[in-house]
Image (cartoon, rainbow, N blue to C red):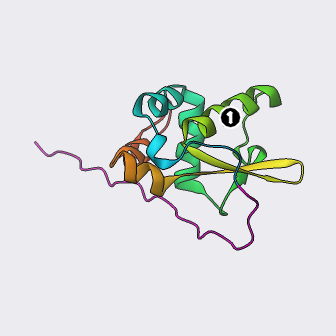
Amino acid sequence: MSATVRQAPVIKVVPEPEDLPEPLPEPAVGELRLETVLGALSDPLRLRIVRKLLLESEAFDHSCGWFGLDRPKSSLTHHFKALREAGVTRQRQYGLERRSHVRVDDLNARFPGLVDLVAAWTPPNAP
């Protein structure tokens, strides 16, 4: 009987560009709480958002339109705010739009292995 070994997904790390706007308020690395981070990730939509950022990023950060989510703007604003306030993502204001990226280094420093678990998660109905 042979076991199928699944390859670990490759997390995309895009270098931080110069002259970024200041991030919106967020917890410092030492203030990140596991129960708060897991609470934010317990919502399937937020988990999909983080996984997409980890595996499919095309730029340093992305606006909510990049995700192609069919949800009202107010709902998306709530989800992105929950991720930022938990310390999972960092958001910056670019004019009228907010863009997000995952705080990979901060999360790895505080909770080793968590980012890899999120990246390895397979959403329902995914191949």
Q: Which residue is mark 1?
A: 81
Residue 93 at x, y percent in the picture: 79, 51
Quadrant where the N terminus sits is top left
In-front residue for pair 51/127: 51
Left or right? Give the position of 123 relative to 68. Answer: left
The image quadrant of residue 85 is top right
Residue 97 at x, y percent in the picture: 84, 48
Question: Mark 1: which amino acid?
Answer: Lys
Residue furthest right as drawn? 96
In-front residue for pair 103/62: 103
Is residue 72 shown to the viewer in this render? no
Left or right? Give the position of 42 relative to 85. Answer: left
Residue at left 78%, top 48%? 98
Q: Where 17 sits versus 33, above or below?
A: below
Give the residues drawn in magenta, as a range.
1-22
Question: Counting other residues with Cα less than 10 Å from the Cα at mark 1, is it few (<14), some (14-19), or many (20 or more)?
Answer: some
Is residue 68 shown to the viewer in this render? yes
Residue at left 65%, top 63%? 60
Residue 96 at x, y percent in the picture: 89, 48
Residue at left 66%, top 31%? 79
* SS at mark 1 in the image: helix
The stretch drawn in magenta includes residue 21: yes
In-front residue for pair 107/3: 107
Residue furthest bottom as drawn? 18
Residue at left 39%, top 52%? 108
The stretch drawn in magenta includes residue 16: yes
Left or right? Give the position of 51 relative to 112. Answer: right
